[in-house]
Amino acid sequence: MKYELVIGLETHVELSTDSKLFCSCGGHSAADTPNDCVCPACSGMPGMLPVTNKHAIELAVKAGLMLNCKINQYTTFDKKSYYYPDLPAAYQITQWFNPVCVEGKVQVGEREIGIKQIHVEEDAGKLVHDDATNTSLVDYNRTSVPLIEIVSKPDFRSSDEVISYLKKLKASLQFAGISECEEGAMRCDVNISVRPEGSDQLGVRSEIKNMSSFAEIKDAIEFEKVRHVDAIERRTEMLVQETRRWDEVKRRTFPMRNKETAADYRYFPDPNLMPIIIDDKWLAEIKASMPVSAEEKGQKYVDMGIASKEAAVLASDAKLCAVFDEVVAMGREPKSVASWILTECMSRMRYLGIETLNIAPAKLSRIIELVDAGEITRAAGKKVLAAVFESDVDVDKYCDEQGLNAKVDTSVIEATVDRVIAENPQAVADYKGGKVKAAGALFGSCMRELKGIGDPAVIKALLEQKLN
Amino acid sequence: MAKYITEINKQGNIAVDDTILVKDYPATAGSKMLENFVPLFSAEAVERLTAAGYTLSGKTAVGEFGLDLYGETGTNDICAAASLVKEGSVKAALNVDLNGAPRRAAALEGVTFIKPTYGTVSRYGIIAAACSGEQIGVTTKDADTAAEVLGVIAGHDAKDGTSLPDKKYDYTVNADVRGKKIALVRELYEAADEAVRAKIDAAVAAYKAQGAEVGEISISILPEIQTAWTILMSAETTNNLSRFDGVKYGYRTEKYKNIDELYVGSRTEAFGFLTKATIVYGSDVLSKGRYDDCYDKALKIRRIAVETLKELFARYDALLLPAYSKTKFEGYPIEDAFMKVYDESRFTAPASITGMPAVVSMGVQLLGDYFSDSRLLGLAKALEKEEA
């Protein structure tokens, strides 16, 4: 019998706010020293009251708009109670009764994935276990950092769809400035079951908790699929609804010893936080601040004359878009800019092992301007670009120092051409003997010697003139 | 019996109860759980008073987390703040009114207490139990002093999400009650003993003599209000007290082998009976399957209570009711505490559940519409005049 997977995702994403969800501590959990980014409020001291970070609500609304959700203009915060040392107040403030976004959808390839809801909540802290001394330490830096939880409907039918969705989600969230989605800032709980193909019944569900690597998620889903199918077909085990964890070393899932599944979270509306009313005016402001989507952006680039494949690569990365848009705004020709970013910049990035493009748009613009105007050669431009990447040099100053100006006096070029001809009698003889290709080798030698100085057309003309 | 559990300054003129934080001084909320807890910051009300030149005299006792109306949960006198005010040692005391304890203490000691309109005084810096109803109030010898101190502490505080937007409130005490309409709440009058009724009778006589109209009304949903408040108060208290788990600060048991034993041991050893009873009750009303019938219904009753009282305040300037059932209390077994407190809360629950202001003066309680704090203080002053 053939089986199909039924998967739903709960994706937790850390929001890019300057401060935590209910206090003024810095928003990013990345503080190096444990408990360095903590105040009486986010460490659960008595006497403190939560005050909602408006920016977090705006970012959640943006995420909802991006995923075609209905925005709840009356949204509330609720308390979820459970005891765990990483949760200092023993309750988490989340949205249970009136989440900010509901009923959305997103296109993943050919399929439409439903979004059940998006809600805002605070993150918990981190426990560090030390087996050697049998102690546990608590770090509250991450406590109360704002998250959104994006809950999909059980609409995925393969691990590939899950990964496509996550990649798209990540790119869109980064693009809209909702989340930087740095390492560990996007975490998934995967709800998974299998059923005979064509069935409308749901199988026994297992939930794999807290995964962040896409590759691991894919492997975990594939593992679970096999486990479920084996259990159904070969009775290898009795499937039960449970929470499991993926062991990256053993490459398999294990049931979690987890009392939470049986826990009663005793949700109730937080009396310290007034309902949030997102009125039409505020909603319109948030809508107006939405960046165009990656698809729209890509289409815009195509309209500017850029090949669709290149446009798609540009549009998939917020940083590439930002640099491209700025350089074009500085008056450079779009096709030229796209080529410089996608070919030259990306080659430098690969060479240096950098993942995000980090170049001052004004410098890139100046290099392109010089090359396009014939002031320096493209080879010289590449040389300057490399120098900018490596030591952030000043473009004009560097060109002067290195003598890269293409309009240098021709005596330098002439002397070089003469020397190359003199040093390569065999090639010259070959050329004169009818081997036209030999001129190419001589030209290459000239270019190498000149290290990017001079206009290639001029050099070529001069060489041919001398040879004949 | 010592009046202060922590002394701050002998020359001070403001006493502060031990659920209100004063930086660097212990704040126990009357609980063994917090016997060594020293806060890192002061309550907003405390900051405003000291900034205005008042000085703190010390911390006064409260029943554990303010749940207790009688004082059984501690060995200290929970009327200490009211008695310091009465003897003139301090000008005023700040007290958290969670379930009516300071209203009751003021009635017993014969001083004035105002629980202001919810949201007018910042709750920042109180050891929270029931956030939706608790409020810092002021105990003073008379209405004028209450208005003075309240004027200093009231007004918007950005650190409290429920703080109302007005920056300042003007408390003008006008003792002229001519033409004012006051309604006596019949059921609560009948629920009090003779000594308490005598105080109400005296107030009625005084108002009539001074030209006010005094009518009599019945509020049919008082039992529901009382139960709903106990549900909300217990549930919120359960949630707020869950942070006291022995992990970060406060009491920690010496005997534990794992985290669960640490939680259970610390809380079992440190909380008193009434607190535990409240937690058991509060956990139940929030639990799966019970939420809709208990907590959610209590929220609906809260809305009905507000509507009902708002209708009455369209016709009356204030309601007159007892603050307590009797003027003298005998001891009883601790196992009865939860029900005893529940019984007695019938007098204080209407103001607690609605967040409407209440003033206790001359042993009686006045309840008014939102923002009628000044009017209630004026009515209190009219009674004080009679006494003088």
Image: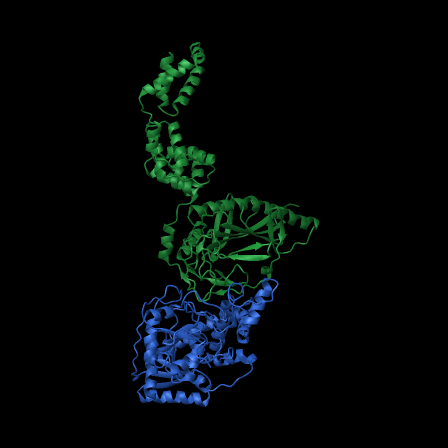
Chain colours: A green, B blue
Q: Quadrant of residue A356?
A: top left
Residue B26 picture location, percent across and down: 45, 70
Q: Nearer the viewer, residue A195 or A26?
A: A26
Quadrant of image for the C terminus of chain B = bottom left
Residue extending farthest to the front is B10
Query: Is any part of residue A372 visible from this angle?
Result: no
Q: Is residue A241 left or right of residue B122?
A: right
Total marks shown come to: 0
In the rendered view, does A318 fall on the left or right side of B169? right
Tell me residue B228's x, y (percent).
48, 74
A431 vs B93: above or below = above
Q: Position of residue A345 (x, y in %)?
A: 42, 35
Q: Can residue A223 be seen?
A: yes
User: Where in the figure is residue B20, as x and y percent of width and height?
Assistant: 43, 71
User: Residue A140, relative to residue A352: is it above or below?
Assistant: below
Give the camera-side residue of A237 and A361: A361
Question: Is A402 rendered above or below residue B6?
Answer: above
In this orientation, which residue lies closer to the viewer: B37 or B98? B37
